[in-house]
Amino acid sequence: FTSESYPELKRDPKFSEISSEHVKFFKDLLGSESAVIDGLSSDASEDIEPFNADWMRKYRGHTKLVLKPGSTEEVSKILKYCNDNTLAVVPQGGNTGLVGGSVPVFDEIVINLSRMNSIRSFDEVSGILVADAGVILEVADNFLAEKSHIFPLDLGAKGSCQIGGNVATNAGGLRLLRYGSLHGNVLGIEAVLPDGTIVDDLSKLRKNNTGYDIKQLFIGGEGTIGIITAISIFCPQRSPAINAAYFGLSSFEKVQQAFREAKAQLSEILSAFELMDGRSQKLLHKASGRKLPLEGEHPFYCLIETSGSNSDHDSEKLEAFLEHVMGEEIVDDGVVAQDQTQIADLWACREGVPECLGHWGGVYKYDLSIPIGELYAIVEETRERIKKAGLMGNSDEYPVVDVVGYGHMGDANLHLNVSVRRYDKKVEKELEPFVYEWVAKRNGSISAEHGLGIAKKAFIGYSRSETMIRLMKQIKELYDPKGIMNPYKYI
Ligand code: FAD
Ligand code: 2HG
Ligand code: ZN
């Protein structure tokens, strides 16, 4: 989608167009050649394209300028200049977001945080890490691993996404079940407001009840009120013993039973409980050629991870759990990883799903919170609906390849993905508002963890009341009165 795909969206004429005078100001400010990608000069037009397109290659903007500040002071000077000159901006981290929030819609200036990538401090006693927003998640986690600690968030895009982007989207990921949400783990934030004010709230305190907790507005704020330049975050001790198991089940009823048993029997060592339906695993195999861990086909698969301090004790518990659930016929078949490579192979069957589903051309993605008992019903109903409309089949004449479900069972967060050969208005019409209405009827959320961006902008009303939306708008106006921060997106 480009701005042309949204005829209701018009470039707001209040925003200035980028001129060579603006570009000169930024070049003088940032100095280094690589810190400014100037799309006004024709030889840079190719270099600028990766910043205009999102990870899915689904949303594309038309920026003519990318800025890569190297310090909080530079971010402050950039934003102040943009605010004074009414230039619209988009904060951008690793550009792995899935709702089109990290790319411009029209010609907004991209402010990319990749050069702000230093770890500022780590306290081995408290486990508190302070780091620049542009540190890549995997780099932060590797740094912590050397100190026997772990970043309390993990997700498939860890090699590219940045911790500032993770906080700006309030990413949930694969171990929220164990470590909880960033709303609890992030202890402090350094951010820059549109007028250039530096908000230094890099608290390292776990407890601080002195008035409103303003940093929470930046967590999940999707870059609409300011740019996060650094975070301080509570990082738990890394468990020395990690085990993983993958198993096949015959129904969603059994998946729920297995989840209950896992909580009861694995209790404090359970660190992930992920769900993949059989169809998502089949498509993973088709797209990537990856051999699946179990023989035969099962309607559902689960991946369980345990993290604890005693390997023998944990594997014994996991083996006993598997024996129990197989003996009770809750689980049809299963395998426990025997070493690090096997653990990584099992995880690849889960983490590889989002990318593989795009293999045939595109994906419609819905990231839903649903009461757990009905978590999978939406997938079946959506598939039936698409089939009935004659849109799904094995040959090229059908736009839809398959409708699949997977996600974070432990958090009641389902990813409904419709894998397509091409984007098609007929498919879209079957999906929307059907999916949103279905979720709203059950008091679920239309975005559990990816955010709203531009993709879900029009649908916020399915999950938030008018009063809540009014309060959000008031906050936006207070922090960003000229509306330069990530315009045209959800707020
Ligand atoms: P970007 O994509 O660059 O930006 C995302 C949003 O944050 C944009 O609105 C942007 O304007 C804003 N932003 C970025 N940096 C800043 C900053 N410093 N200050 C202010 N605003 C900023 N999400 C989950 O929750 N759970 C998952 O399990 C998960 N798995 C994923 C797996 C894959 C393969 C992919 C591609 C994505 C996945 N995601 C997941 C989506 C997730 O939102 C992102 O991967 C990640 O959190 C975004 O970080 P980023 O640095 O790429 O941010
Ligand atoms: C995941 O859990 C991510 O793998 C991506 O949140 C989900 O692509 C998706 O729909
Ligand atoms: Zn997810």
Image (spheres, rainbow, N blue to C red):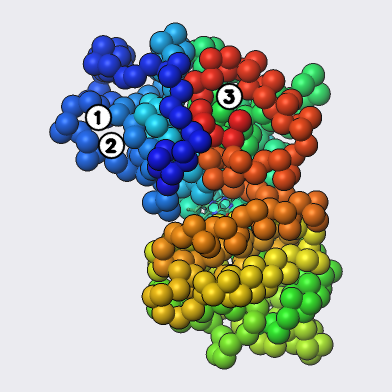
Q: Quadrant of residue 220?
A: top right
Question: Is residue 270 at least partly visible in the picture?
Answer: no
Q: Provide residue 8's location: percent of width, then percent of height.
A: 51, 36
How far apart are the two marked residues, 3 and 2, measured between alpha carbons? 25 Å
Q: Is residue 289 above or below residue 413?
A: below
Q: Is residue 485 above or below residue 351?
A: above
**Residue designated by label 3:** 225
Q: Residues within 10 Å of mark 1 (few under 14, many from 20)?
A: many
Tag 1 secondary structure:
loop
**Residue designated by label 2:** 48
Q: Which mark is residue 4?
A: none
Q: Amino acid at mark 2?
A: Ile
Q: Amino acid at mark 1?
A: Gly
Q: Does the residue at mark 1 contact the one at mark 3 (Cβ under 8 Å)?
A: no
Nearer to me, 367 or 5: 5
Most extreme residue toward the left, as rendered?
A: 43
Q: Does the residue at mark 1 contact the one at mark 2 (Cβ under 8 Å)?
A: yes
Most extreme residue toward the right, as rendered?
A: 264
Q: Is residue 13 above or below residue 386?
A: above
Q: Provide residue 73's location: percent of width, then percent of height.
A: 44, 15
> In this image, 23 relative to 458: left or right?
left
**Residue designated by label 1:** 39
Tag 2 secondary structure:
helix
Q: Amino acid at mark 3?
A: Ile
Q: Provide residue 267's location: percent of width, then percent of height.
A: 80, 64
Residue ID at (74%, 65%): 375
Residue ID at (25%, 23%): 32
How far apart are the two marked residues, 1 and 2, measured between alpha carbons? 6 Å
